[in-house]
Amino acid sequence: MGAGRPEEGKGERMARWYRNVNALGALACFAAGAVLTAPLAVAANTLGVLNLAQAAGGEVIRQSAQKRHKKS
């Protein structure tokens, strides 16, 4: 896929994609929360925090897939 990551496995690529999508979702939610009124801003920021947690989980999955890939 990327020229700089020829040894990357499918699990790593999928986890990286999952992490990046959730990070972008968090950014979009926080941006929306900055311009919305109070009740909607709280909801948007809550969704942003959940997306950040999922992005962190995606990074943990990617790192464990990377370790598994290096062992084999």
Image: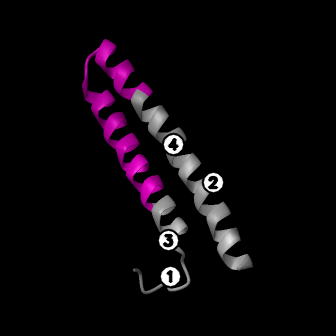
| CA separation in Å, label 1 and label 3 | 11 Å
- The x and y percentages for residue 53 are 54, 39
Q: CA distance from mark 1 to mark 2?
A: 18 Å
Q: CA distance from mark 2 to mark 4?
A: 10 Å
Q: Quadrant of the C terminus?
A: bottom right
Q: Which residue is mark 1?
A: 5
Whether 52 is drawn above or below 36: the answer is: below
* 23 in relation to 64, above or below: above
Give me the residue at 51% from left, 59% from top.
Answer: 15
Toward which corner of the image does residue 30 lie, by quadrant? top left
> Of callouts 1 and 3, which one flags the residue occurring earlier in the amino acid sequence?
1
Q: Quadrant of residue 26?
A: top left
Q: Which residue is mark 4?
A: 54
Q: Secondary structure at mark 3?
A: helix
Residue at position x 60%, y 56% in the image: 61
> To which residue does mark 3 refer?
10
Q: Residue at x 38, y 19 (%)?
A: 42
